[in-house]
């Protein structure tokens, strides 16, 4: 069957069926990647800290994600008497739905039959920022609805951290949009066919890396769930499956920002050095995997920042630096035209 026959067949299939099948495939793949990225993190951290890591469940510990999922499903799910029953139960699903929703507009590769993704949206980067910014409500509502002071403090920290670092993150991305002349994620990748934007936007890329780690509440910016200060942070009063949903959302957000970095700065599915013999999807996965490895490396290496220093770093350094990078990029594009 030729490519033309495949395209003709797709044109006869109802659009809602195509979208549904694509969504199911993407969700299954993303959930599998999440499960084994968690195992990958534990293995890498163990390697860096000279210990074996998970190796009991299945060969080389490959069944550990399934064991963790079963444990979460069968653990007792408790609800505090002081909690708001509806919002307390709804908050984990808000975080999870927002984390999953971002993958609907991420193009993972390109083939002769079209974009590998659920939908190719013209304003893809804006849609992702809109969806992921709502995800903070899941954490905030979880902390507030728990009826306890430590989760509430974690929720307040999450809100303040999101506001302070999302501004700098947006500024770092706008420089890429100016160079590409489009907000379409596939269009940005096509604009990097010759030069990846990590080269002209190296400062924007560095700012994006720092703000992405802070946005996803990962070490050394994981003050939202600082066990030395807040017991467990915003999810202190959660247990069982609802407790696990927050961690699923956290890892999915980590994968999301890795995909965005790949699309905006690392050329997406474009092959480096003209090595087109390897499919674009493989290059995309390798680049995103490298970004996730950086997350793990930071967690294993750096201690947690003090909260006031975290806020000062966001407002007094990153935001001015991102603004300056944006102004210089805009001036250069305007002059060179």
Image (cartoon, rainbow, N blue to C red):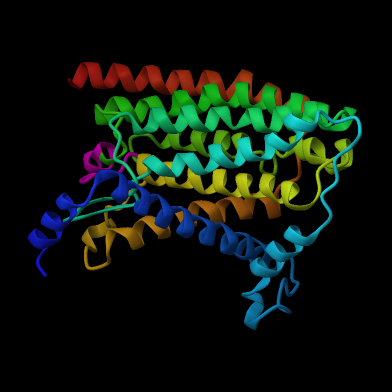
Q: What residue is at 51 percent from the left and 60 percent from the top?
A: 33
The answer to whether any part of residue 98 appears in the image is yes
Q: Is residue 257 visible?
A: no
User: Is 20 included in the stretch rendered in magenta?
Assistant: no
Q: Is residue 200 above or below residue 117?
A: above
Residue at (27% x, 41% y) in the render: 186
- Left or right? Give the position of 193 relative to 137: left
Q: Foreground residue, 165 or 254?
A: 254
Q: In the image, residue 216 lies at what x, y percent?
A: 61, 39
Nearest to the observer: residue 221 or residue 239: 239
In the rendered view, does 214 fall on the left or right side of 101?
Answer: right
Quadrant holding the C terminus: top left
Depth check: give the residue in front, 128 or 73: 73
Q: Is residue 160 left or right of residue 24?
A: right
State the extent of the magenta-drawn residues as a range.
187-197
The residue at 76%/41% (across/down) is: 304
The quadrant of the image that shows the N terminus is bottom left
In this rendering, the answer to whether 122 lies above or below 219 is above
Q: Quadrant of residue 307?
A: top right
Q: Position of residue 22 (x, y in %)?
A: 35, 52
């Amino acid at each position: 069957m030729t490519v033309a026959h495949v395209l003709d067949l797709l044109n006869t299939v109802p659009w809602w069926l195509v979208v549904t099948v694509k969504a199911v495939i993407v969700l299954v793949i993303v959930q599998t990647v999440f499960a084994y990225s968690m195992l990958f993190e534990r293995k890498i951290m163990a390697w860096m800290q000279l210990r074996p890591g998970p190796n009991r469940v299945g060969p080389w510990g490959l069944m550990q994600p399934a064991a963790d999922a079963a444990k979460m499903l069968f653990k007792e799910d408790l609800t505090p008497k002081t909690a708001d029953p509806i919002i307390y139960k709804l908050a984990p699903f808000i975080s999870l739905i927002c984390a999953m929703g971002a993958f609907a507009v991420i193009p993972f590769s390109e083939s002769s039959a079209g974009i590998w993704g659920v939908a190719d949206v013209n304003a893809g980067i804006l849609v992702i920022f809109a969806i992921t910014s709502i995800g903070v409500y899941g954490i905030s509502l979880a902390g507030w609805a728990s009826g306890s002071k430590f989760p509430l403090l974690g929720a307040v920290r999450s809100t303040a951290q999101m506001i302070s670092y999302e501004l700098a993150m947006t500024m770092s991305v706008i420089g890429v949009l100016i160079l590409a002349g489009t907000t379409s994620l596939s269009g940005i990748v096509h604009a990097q066919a010759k030069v990846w934007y990590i080269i002209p936007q190296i400062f924007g890329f560095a700012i994006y890396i720092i703000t992405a780690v802070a946005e996803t509440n990962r070490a050394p910016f994981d003050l939202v769930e600082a066990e030395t200060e807040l017991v467990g942070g915003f999810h202190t009063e959660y247990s069982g499956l609802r407790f696990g949903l927050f961690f699923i959302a956290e890892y999915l957000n980590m994968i999301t920002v890795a995909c965005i970095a790949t699309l905006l700065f690392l050329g997406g599915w474009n092959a480096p050095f003209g090595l087109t013999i390897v499919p674009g999807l493989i290059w995309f996965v390798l680049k995103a995997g490298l970004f996730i490895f950086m997350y793990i490396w930071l967690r294993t290496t750096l201690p947690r920042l003090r909260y006031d220093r975290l806020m000062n770093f966001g407002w007094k350094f990153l935001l001015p630096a991102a603004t300056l990078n944006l102004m210089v990029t805009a001036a250069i594009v305007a002059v060179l035209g």
